Image (tube, coloured by chain):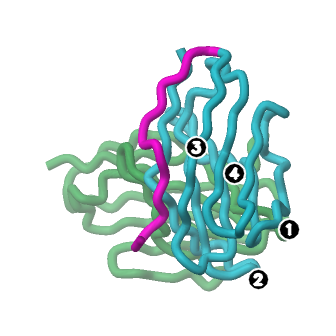
Amino acid sequence: RKEVEQDPGPFNVPEGATVAFNCTYSNSASQSFFWYRQDCRKEPKLLMSVYSSGNEDGRFTAQLNRASQYISLLIRDSKLSDSATYLCVVLTGRRALTFGSGTRLQVQP
Amino acid sequence: GAGVSQSPRYKVAKRGQDVALRCDPISGHVSLFWYQQALGQGPEFLTYFQNEAQLDKSGLPSDRFFAERPEGSVSTLKIQRTQQEDSAVYLCASSWHGDRDNEKLFFGSGTQLSVL
């Protein structure tokens, strides 16, 4: 079983739609959580950190459920420019970041 | 430079050939990571340096893979006797601190390695 699991998608949504991605992690000792965004043939870039209390950055909302070991990302009012792969990422102990395989989003006009 | 620089951008190697991939991190960044990303997958951890010390190499898939950062700045990932399964994008990332502020990674554009 992979340490971080995501639905690979693709999620095809119209502009203006709300879309949610989910991610589960297997190590209960994981202490920090993030969403990274990766455009086609580009490097990953940090989108936002994820906190237990939930956090919002504009149209993006991230949630963490430690009991269920579950992380989510909600995107409201989708834009064409949101089309990318969204990587769920966890930090466990003193190890390097562990990335999920990513969920691909395609926003259509 | 302003960001993490990797070279070459593309590398085509014949099976059995040795390759060397270079990473020039952001000036002053203490931590440096190498990741391997296969097509359609997320980045997989290979190895981690704090300054010149290689603190974790648990992700290196075989003893054909070797990484170094002798002066705590530029790093080189070397792959000996390349195999087709080594074909992937090799990403280098760096971050400021050695005190585990490693979540704020800055990635280079990667080296796409194709082994024929």
Q: Counting residues from the N terminus, which is met first, the one under dot 1 or under dot 4?
A: 4
Label 1 marks a residue whose chain is A
- Residue at horizontal 46 percent and vertical 69 percent from the top: A47
Is B74 colored magenta in this rendering?
no
Query: Pointer 2: residues within 10 angstroms few (<14), some, or many (20+)?
Result: few
Labels 3 and 4 share a subunit: no
Q: Which mark is residue A4?
A: 4
Chain letter of mark 3 equals B
Examine the rendered structure and indicate whether residue A77 appears above or below residue B108.
below
Q: Nearer the viewer, residue A47 or B45?
A: B45
- Residue B8 drawn above or below residue A89: above
Which label was assigned to residue B54?
Answer: none
Give amino acid for label 4: Val
Numbered label attached to residue B21: 3
Q: Amino acid under label 3? A: Leu
Q: Viewed as shown, does residue A109 lie left or right of A79?
A: left
Q: Which mark is residue A29?
A: 1
- Of residue B29 and residue A51, the one placed in the foreground of this image is B29
Identity of the amino acid at label 1? Ala
Stretch in magenta: B1-15
**Does residue B20 lie above or below A20 as drawn?**
above
In the picture, one chain is cyan; tell me its letter: B
- Badge 2 marks a residue whose secondary structure is loop
**Cβ atoms at labels 3 and 1 below 8 Å apart:** no
The mark closer to the camera, 3 or 4, is: 3
